[in-house]
Image: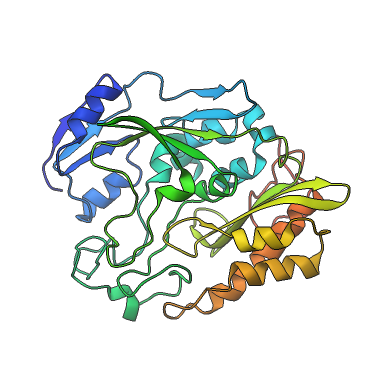
Amino acid sequence: MKTFDYVRPATIAEAVAASAAPGAAYLASGTNLLDLMKVGAARPDRLIDITHIAGLDHIDWLADGGVRIGALVRNADLAHDPAFVRAYPAVAEALLSGASAQLRNAATGGGNLLQRTRCAYFGDPASACNKREPGSGCDALGGENRLHAVLGWSPSCIAVHPSDFCVPLVALDAVAEIEGRAGRREIPLESLYCLPGDAPQRETVLEPGDLIVALRLADPTAFARHARYLKLRERTSYAFAVVSAAAALAMEEGRIRQARLALGGVAAKPWRARAAEDILAGARPGETIFRRAAEAALADARPSGDNAYKIELARRIIVRALTLAAAGTPQRLPALPASPFSSAPGARHAA
């Protein structure tokens, strides 16, 4: 591992000032960053440990009915918070489908948003990777790429964003609060991420020194009763999504008044399926309209290698997620959160 400076600021302002220099990186639990440092895929000159900054580990319920989640709130704490589970069940289900219980106990919400791709070529310094070393090429294009992107990819990069948490957040219009050298600003989470284009090394719109301090979600009343997250993976526990979908429906007199739909495992960012949402608005729920929505969501999809199968899988996971959402949110989280192999609502554990 490359040697590095270690800084432990006491305030957000100190952290931002320490991180503005090139080669600096923020450290929370390090569940992703430290792994990359050990193999040489990440080589920061300075680590800024933000875990001792007060106030970043709170879950605050807002006067407008929404919630503010501090960047250092642990994934497990958020997923098992009873009020949060009731209000945002799809987000809790996504959290509990990610990684292992041990990692969820350590990993933070802010770190989850900024975790790096699990593309094997990015994690291997001996491989060509434009994301890790701009201009070096992309070995994934001609390599093992059955799990790579089918939407928004470019000849420079076909990697996917690995987060489960981010998928329902994007579907529900989450907003990130960011502290930077120019002060505090807000960015819709959907707009935080960049598609690869010709510059895959730029994964977000964050500037040097920018620190995500919190996430905000709006009042969940419209969608809480019909929201699900569904994830297809190669094994039910401790695996990243091959494809996933977050679906939330606002129902009124048997019709879908509003729909929210986002996909995971298909692109370099959580993918909001707005064309599908437009098709669903005003319709009665059912397989026919759900299939139309799925076709619209994947209309621009194309294989980036040996992964054409992912397009059909994504269509099917959309239909299944919408069907489950229309049937209603389980009163308790499923025993196998987000798994299509979980039994029908009824086999659950207490939230």
The quadrant in which residue 90 appears is: top right
Q: Where is residue 226 in the image (x, y as percent from the top left)?
A: 75, 46
Q: Position of residue 328 (x, y in %)?
A: 79, 47
Residue 119 vs residue 163: left or right? left
The quadrant in which residue 87 appears is: top right
Q: Is residue 4 above or below residue 276?
A: above
Residue 92 vs residue 131: left or right? right
Q: Position of residue 9 (x, y in %)?
A: 23, 23
Asked whether the viewer can see residue 249, the reply is: yes
Q: How many marks?
A: 0
Q: Is residue 206 above or below residue 294?
A: above
Asked whether the viewer can see residue 346, the reply is: no
Query: Is the C terminus in the top left, top right, bottom left or bottom right quadrant?
Result: top right
Q: Nearer the viewer, residue 162 or 214?
A: 214
The quadrant in which residue 5 appears is: top left
What residue is at 40 percent from the left and 52 percent from the top?
193
Residue 319 vs residue 41: left or right? right
What residue is at 33 percent from the left and 75 percent from the top?
155
What residue is at 69 percent from the left and 66 percent from the top?
293
What residue is at 32 percent from the left and 21 percent from the top?
53
Q: In this view, does 249 lie above or below 183?
A: below
Looking at the picture, the colour scheme in use is: rainbow
Tell which residue pokes out farthest to the right in this image: 253
Q: Which of 252 and 134 is in front in this view?
A: 252
Q: Where is residue 72 in the image (x, y as percent from the top left)?
A: 41, 30
